[in-house]
Image (tube, rainbow, N blue to C red):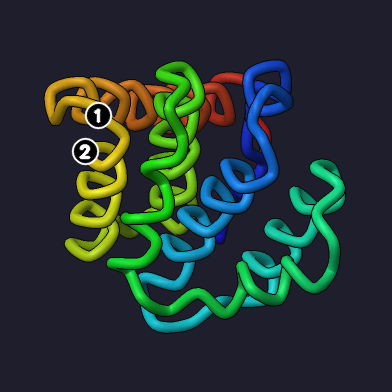
Amino acid sequence: MSNLGMEMNMNILSKLNDNQRIAFMKALASLANADGKLDKEEIEFIKDVAVIYGVPESRVQEILQVSNVDDVVDSVKVIDNRRAALELIKEMCILAHADNELSDAEVLLIGRVGQAMGVELEKIEQISQWVIDRVIWLEEAKLIFEEA
């Protein structure tokens, strides 16, 4: 994973209730596990976000042990705030691109999660393209400013 430095909009996410926050985090954990394994960086990222949200350790274990994608897709339906739903799609796209390998399983999960929250496929594609453009822009910055 080259970059798990998410840019979550904490103002939007602070308005979610506990169940919505857990669903948000389960979606990220499920995406991180789309390749069949959660690596150390992914686990630490999820734990860090949980601390920020004040999620109890017992719920963190529940989040990390998520394995049924259908349950995750069903759980995000509680996120009824459009801006929070778009934020989740953005964070999922950033996480999916963090290892520079976008798998079919990741694309499918992002689409299913978005649609479960009422986000149109066109909007999901727009967000995904924005994230790709951002990744390219950040890589160009490394070249321009001669960063290692």
Displayed quadrant of residue 78? top left
Quadrant location of residue 85? top left
Residue drawn at x 28%, y 67% is 70
Relative placement, left or right, of 145 versus 128 is right
Per the image, label 1 sits on a secondary structure element best described as loop
- Residues under numbered marks 1 and 2 in contact, where contact means CB atoms less than 8 Å apart: yes
Read off the residue under disc 1.
118
The answer to whether one can see residue 140 in this image is: no
Above-or-below relation of 12 to 60: above
Mark 1 surroundings: few (<14), some (14-19) or many (≥20) residues within 10 A: some
For the C terminus, the quadrant is top right
On residue 6, the disc is none
Q: In this view, does 28 lie above or below 53?
A: below
Residue positioned 52% across, 27% down in the render: 138
- Residue displayed at 36% across by 76% down: 68
Q: Does 82 appear above or below 13?
A: above
Q: Residue at x 58, y 30 (%)?
A: 142
Q: Residue 143 at x, y = what percent?
A: 53, 28
Q: Which of 80 and 28 is in front in this view?
A: 80
Q: In which quarter of the image is the N terminus?
A: bottom right
Residue 11: percent from left, percent from top: 71, 17
Horizontal and vertical percent for residue 4? 62, 49
Amino acid type for the residue under numbered disc 2: Gln
Q: Along the line of sight, which residue is nearer the eye, 57 or 74?
A: 74
Q: Distance between the residues labelled 1 and 2?
A: 5 Å
Q: In which quarter of the image is residue 31?
A: bottom left
Label 2 sits on residue? 115
Foreground residue among 50 and 23: 23
Classify 10 Å Cα crowding around label 2: few (below 14), some (14-19), many (20 and above).
some
- Residue 132 visible to the viewer: yes
> Mark 1 belongs to which amino acid?
Gly
Q: How many labels does the image show?
A: 2
